Image (cartoon, helix red, strand yellow):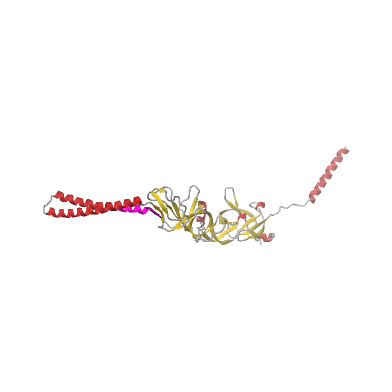
C-alpha cells in the first residue's frame, strides 16, 4: 500500500515538472522567407538571330569540254584569277578544222549549183511562153532551182555547226573568278559533256553565306512582328569566324527560302558579303547574326527568373501587391546573352522573383529584397532586406 502511494507521488511530480517546462518553452512562429526581385521594365532591343552558317560561292561554273579530243595546252595557272572568255584549254583542232573546210566547200559547191539552176529556170521560163519546150521541162527546171536554193540553207547550217565545234576546241572561262585544280594535263583525252569537270571556277567577291533557322523560331518571330512596337530590322548580318574572331565586313540579307527542309525542319536564309581579301572560302562554317527587327518596348529579364517545365513550357514567379507569390506562364522568344526576351506573360512594373524560389511556393508570403541587373542581365546590386512596412509598399 505504501509502495503504491510512492509511485503515485512520483507520477504527480513528473507531470508537474513537465507542465512547468512546457510553460517556460518559447513559442515558435513561422518565419517569412526573404526573396530577391526586380521590377520588370521595357527597353529598346534589336532582335538579332544567331544561326549556324556555311560559306558558298556567289557563282560557280564547272569547266567541261563540249567536243571530244586531246588536250594540247593548258593556258592557266591553278588557283589564279581568270576572266570571263579567257582561254583555259586548247583541244587538238585538226579534225574539226577539216570538218569546217569540208562544210565550207560544200556550201560553195551548192552556191555554184544554185546559180546554174537559177539561170536554167529563167531561160526555161522564157521558152515556155514561146512554146519552145514542154511544160514538164519547165517545171523540172524550176523544181531543180528550188532544191538548189534549199541546199544552200542546209550547207550553211552545216558550216555554222562545224564553225561552232571548231570554236569549242578552245575551252574558255564561262565566268570570272578563281579557278581551282585542273583534273587533266596536256595529252589527256577528253570527251564531250563528260561527267568529271576539267576544273571549277568560283566567284568569291562578293560571296554568299547560307544560314539555317528552325521553322519554330521563324514562327515565333513572325508572331512577334505583329506587335505595333516592333519595327523591321535593317537585315544587316555580321559573322563570327571559326577561330572566334569577328569578320571585318558586314553583309546584307538577300533572300529566304520559301520552303522548310523536311529532314531538318529548318529554313535557309542567304546573305551576301564583300570578300576583297579572300578570307571567306566556300565550305567554311561560320556563325551569323542577323538584325531582323527592333522592339521599342521589349521585356528582357534574367534567365535565372524564368523556369521551364518538363514539356518545355516556361513560367515565372511574380510577387503580388500583398507580397504573395504567383506562378505565371510566360512565352519566351530567344536568349539574349543571359537574359530571356519575353513575348507574353510579364508586364512592365511586375515584381519578378529572381532569387529564393527554392524557399517558396505559389501563394507563399515573402519579404522583398529589391535587386538590379546590368545590361547583360546579371544581378549586380542587392539592397538590404525591406522592413514589413516598406515591403508592403513594394520594397526600396
| Magenta stretch holds residue 64 | no
Q: Quadrant of the N terminus?
A: top right
Estimate the x, y position of residue 147 in percent, counting from the top left. 22, 50
Asked if one can make out residue 10 in the rendered structure from this viewpoint, the answer is yes
The residue depicted at 83 percent of the width and 42 percent of the height is 11
Instruction: Name the image quarter holding residue 246.
Output: bottom right
SS majority, magenta: helix
Residue nearest the observer in this picture, 237 or 131: 131
Residue nearest the observer in this picture, 64 or 235: 64
Q: Residue furthest top?
A: 1
Q: Residue furthest left?
A: 131
Asked if one can make out residue 219 in the rendered structure from this viewpoint, the answer is no
Estimate the x, y position of residue 238 in percent, counting from the top left. 53, 59
**In the rendered picture of this protein, how many numbered marks are placed on residues?**
0
Residue nearest the observer in this picture, 10 or 355: 355
Is 147 situated above or below 383? above
Q: Which residues are magenta?
A: 159-172
Specify whether 95 is left or right of 241. left
The residue depicted at 83 percent of the width and 44 percent of the height is 12
Q: Residue furthest right?
A: 2
Estimate the x, y position of residue 163 in percent, counting from the top left. 33, 54
Estimate the x, y position of residue 76 in percent, counting from the top left. 44, 56
Specify whether 393 is left or right of 127. right
Q: Quadrant of the C terminus?
A: bottom right
Residue nearest the observer in this picture, 262 or 66: 66
Amino acid at each position: 500500500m505504501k509502495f503504491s502511494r510512492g509511485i503515485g507521488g512520483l507520477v504527480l511530480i513528473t507531470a508537474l515538472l513537465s507542465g512547468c517546462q512546457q510553460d517556460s518553452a518559447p513559442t515558435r512562429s513561422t518565419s517569412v522567407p526573404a526573396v530577391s526581385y526586380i521590377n520588370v521594365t521595357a527597353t529598346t532591343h534589336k532582335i538579332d538571330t544567331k544561326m549556324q552558317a556555311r560559306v558558298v560561292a556567289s557563282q560557280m561554273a564547272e569547266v567541261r569540254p563540249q567536243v571530244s579530243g586531246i588536250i594540247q595546252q593548258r593556258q592557266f595557272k591553278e588557283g589564279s584569277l581568270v576572266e570571263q572568255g579567257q582561254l583555259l584549254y586548247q583541244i587538238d583542232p585538226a579534225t574539226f578544222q577539216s570538218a569546217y573546210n569540208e562544210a565550207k566547200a560544200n556550201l560553195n559547191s551548192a552556191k555554184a549549183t544554185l546559180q546554174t539552176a537559177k539561170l536554167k529556170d529563167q531561160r526555161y521560163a522564157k521558152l515556155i511562153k514561146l512554146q519552145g519546150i514542154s511544160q514538164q521541162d519547165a517545171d523540172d527546171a524550176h523544181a531543180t532551182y528550188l532544191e538548189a536554193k534549199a541546199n544552200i540553207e542546209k550547207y550553211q547550217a552545216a558550216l555554222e555547226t562545224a564553225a561552232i565545234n571548231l570554236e569549242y576546241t578552245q575551252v574558255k572561262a564561262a565566268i570570272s573568278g578563281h579557278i581551282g585544280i585542273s583534273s587533266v594535263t596536256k595529252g589527256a583525252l577528253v570527251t564531250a559533256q563528260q561527267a568529271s569537270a576539267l576544273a571549277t571556277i568560283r566567284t568569291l567577291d562578293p560571296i554568299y553565306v547560307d544560314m539555317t533557322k528552325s521553322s519554330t523560331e521563324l514562327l515565333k518571330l513572325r508572331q512577334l512582328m505583329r506587335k505595333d512596337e516592333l519595327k523591321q530590322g535593317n537585315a544587316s548580318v555580321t559573322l563570327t569566324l571559326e577561330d572566334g574572331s569577328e569578320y571585318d565586313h558586314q553583309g546584307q540579307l538577300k533572300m529566304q527560302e520559301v520552303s522548310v527542309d523536311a529532314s531538318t525542319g529548318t529554313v535557309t536564309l542567304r546573305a551576301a558579303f564583300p570578300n576583297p581579301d579572300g578570307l571567306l572560302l566556300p565550305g567554311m562554317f561560320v556563325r551569323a547574326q542577323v538584325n531582323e527587327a527592333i522592339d521599342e518596348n521589349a521585356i528582357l529579364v534574367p534567365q535565372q527568373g524564368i523556369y521551364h517545365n518538363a514539356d518545355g513550357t516556361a513560367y515565372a514567379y511574380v510577387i503580388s501587391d500583398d507580397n504573395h507569390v504567383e506562378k505565371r506562364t510566360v512565352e519566351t522568344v530567344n536568349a539574349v546573352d543571359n537574359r530571356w526576351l519575353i513575348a507574353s506573360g510579364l508586364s512592365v512594373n511586375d515584381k519578378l522573383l529572381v532569387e529564393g524560389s527554392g524557399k517558396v511556393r505559389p501563394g507563399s508570403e515573402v519579404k522583398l529584397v529589391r535587386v538590379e541587373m546590368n545590361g547583360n542581365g546579371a544581378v549586380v546590386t542587392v539592397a538590404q532586406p525591406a522592413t514589413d512596412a516598406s515591403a508592403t509598399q513594394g520594397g526600396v
